[in-house]
Amino acid sequence: MVSQLNINTQQAGYSFKFCSWNCKGLNQPIKRSKVLHHLQFLGAQVVFLQETHLKISDHFRLRKGWVGQLYHSTFNSKVRGVAILIHKSVPFVSSKVIADQNGRFIIVSGSIWNTKFIFANVYAPNWDDPNFFSILFTKISDLSSHYLVLGGDFNCWLRPLDRSS
């Protein structure tokens, strides 16, 4: 999903293009390359990736060409995993990073032109786990002073008809 957000900052009229994508694994070099090239083609500037399935030592492979900043959370095996990729052209300055030890979310606080943001990427469990969301939302602080951009795969549905067996 790609969406565009117009931001009212000191740089009037500037907009960012966001993308959220459940990749279902980026261990294969060809798939990883295709995903990164497609994101570049879309003009995405802030990208939320879920199910990266990468180990800590493999996340550097996402830092290609257009990627200026990379934040990630991994699990202890090649499952789960989330990442936030920020384009080189985005003048984002991070101030705080919270990475979930289970590879379910990454929360990055920072600013763009003195406008404060929280970027949060979520890969929620695919079973009903209210405790997960309680923990997640207590970790996202500073909502009164920051804009929140929340992306991810929440593994939930709005209506029972939206769910397949």
Image: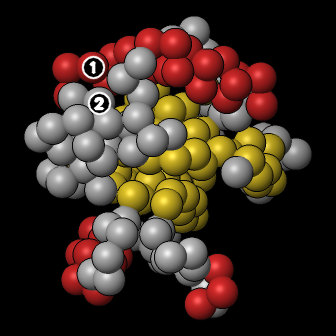
Question: What residue would you read off at disc 2?
Answer: 54
Residue type at mark 1 is Asp
Q: Is residue 104 above or below residue 96?
A: below
Total label count?
Answer: 2
Q: Identify which residue, 94 or 3, lies in the foreground.
A: 3
Colour logic? secondary structure
**Gap in angstroms between the C-alphas marked 1 and 2:** 6 Å
Q: What residue is at 34 percent from the left and 51 percent from the top?
A: 106
- Which residue sits furthest left? 76
Q: Where does the image place residue 74, in percent across and percent down from the top left?
A: 23, 41
- Which residue sits furthest top? 65
- Which residue sits furthest right? 13
Q: Is residue 129 above or below residue 105?
A: below
User: Crowding near pointer 1: few (<14 within 10 Å), some, many (20+)?
Assistant: few
Question: What residue would you read off at disc 1?
Answer: 58
Q: What residue is at 50 percent from the left and 21 percent from the top?
A: 32
Q: Secondary structure at mark 2?
A: loop
Q: Secondary structure at mark 1?
A: helix
Residue type at mark 2 is Leu
Q: What residue is at 50 percent from the left and 76 percent from the top?
A: 165
Q: Quadrant of residue 52?
A: top left
| Residue 104 in view here | yes
Q: Identify which residue, 6 or 162, lies in the foreground.
A: 162
Circles 1 and 2, Cβ within 8 Å, touching? The answer is yes
Q: Where does the image place residue 15, in percent across and percent down from the top left?
A: 80, 44
Q: What residue is at 39 percent from the left and 45 percent from the top?
A: 51
User: Crowding near pointer 2: few (<14 within 10 Å), some, many (20+)?
Assistant: many
